[in-house]
Structure formats: structure tokens, C-alpha cells
Amino acid sequence: MIGKIFLSLGLTVLLAACGGGGGGFETNYNQVEQSVARNWRVAKVEVVVPNSLTVSEKNSYMPNADIVWHGDPTGDRRAQVAAIFRDAIGKGTAGLRGKQPVTLRVVVTQFHALTPKARGMGGNVGVHDIRFDARIYDGRSGEPLTDNFPIKADIAALVGQNAADADARGFTQKVEISEHLETVFRNWLGGYGDDPRNSFSRLGR
């Protein structure tokens, strides 16, 4: 029992050191004006996951890498992350049916989800730490129509028994993140749907 207590305390210290000791996380961005976005129709989506981003396959509590993703079978993690974004963008922008075709370009800067080991923990721990830049371009000329929008899309992750129960009903880590990103894109482009912007404190990366 004493050994388990010290292990728990040590893990808490480790997470605090890596994640700022239960410091602040947030989903935050500046919205595109609705009067502008409602004239758009997303005709093309470009998702860039730079090769410069580091990737970890370690099943540890807090791998030190830009991309940590275990929600798909072992494979090209950059391609898997890009596919998650493309799917979320497609669903999140489906309501834009304006006359002007546009290209939405996203550059991922961080996609740090939970490892199986971290997801098995209980308590107030675990953060999907997701960051990216987004910009809209004219679909015909390629000229930028907006400035670059840095977007933070952190989400408090399901862990422990809550995660196991969610998996059992099909609400996997992948679905959890995908639905959050879908909401982010829908609300970012004109303020439609629920506003997911919030801040929270939790032990995590």
C-alpha cells in the first residue's frame, strides 16, 4: 500500500512537472465574422502535419513529443492525425453553403492525446493537447482571405473507468477528439453551434 501511495505521488509530481502542475488548458480562438463566413463554401481542405513534428510511440504516462496518438492501429501517425482533421472539418463546415468557394488550410502544431497507460489512470488527470493554425483562401485565385488563426483545442480527456465505459458504447478516444474538433470548426467559422471555448485546470501535458 505504501508503495502504491509513493507511486501515485511520484506520478503526480511527474505530471505536474510536464504539464504545469494542474495549470491552465483551454480551447480558445478568435471567430471569423458570421457576415463573412456565411458567404463561403469550403470546396477544398488542406491539412498539413509537418515532418518537423516529433512522434512518440512510447506507452508511458507523458511521452515528450509533438504527436502522441494511439487511437488508430500502428501506422503513419501524421497521416492518421490529418485524416481526423479532414473528417472534422468536413462535418464542421457542412453548414456553410455560400456562393464563394474557399480553401481551408490547417497546419497542425501539436496533437498530444493520451497513451493507453495514461488513459487507464483515474482522477483529475489527462488532457488531449491539440494546437493548430487555420487560414482561409479564395478557392479560385488562391489569395488569402483571412489572417492566420492560431487555435487551441485542448480537451479534458476521459480516463479510468469513464474511458472504459465510453469505449464500451463506442465513444472512443478518436470519437471524443473528432467531435470536439468538429464543434471547434463549426463555431470558429461564424459562431455557429455550441461555443466550445473554455479553460480548465488539470494534470496533463
Image (tube, grey):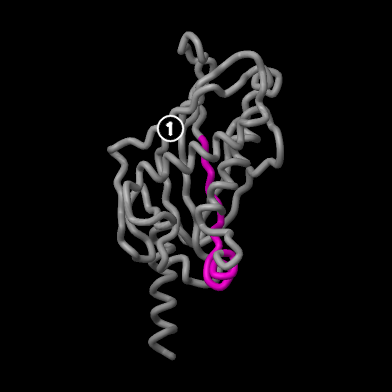
62 relative to 28 in the view: left or right: left
Count up the numbered dots. Answer: 1
Q: Quadrant of the C terminus?
A: bottom left
Picture coordinates of residue 90, whole percent (x, y): 56, 34
Look at mark 1 in the image and give the residue it sits on: 47
Callout 1 secondary element: strand
45 relative to 200 in the view: left or right: left
Highlighted range, magenta: 151-166
Q: Residue at (61%, 21%) from the top-left corner?
A: 41
From the viewer's side, name the closer residue of 88 and 203.
88
Q: Residue at (46%, 59%) from the top-left corner?
A: 204
Q: Residue at (61%, 64%) from the top-left corner?
A: 169
Identity, as a three-letter code, of the amino acid under mark 1? Val
Examine the structure image and report whether residue 95 is included in the region drawn in magenta: no
Picture coordinates of residue 129, whole percent (x, y): 47, 50
* Quarter-of-image position of residue 46: top left
From the viewer's side, name the closer residue of 18 and 34.
34
Seen as rendered, the residue at the extreme bottom is: 1
Does 87 sit above or below residue 164? Answer: above
125 relative to 38 in the view: left or right: left
Picture coordinates of residue 27, whole percent (x, y): 57, 44
Q: Quadrant of the N terminus?
A: bottom left
Seen as rendered, the residue at the extreme top is: 141
Picture coordinates of residue 75, whole percent (x, y): 32, 51
Q: Residue at (51%, 25%) from the top-left corner?
A: 104
Examine the structure image and report whether residue 156 is included in the region drawn in magenta: yes
Give neighbour class at mark 1: few <14, some 14-19, many 20+ (Cα, 10 Å): many
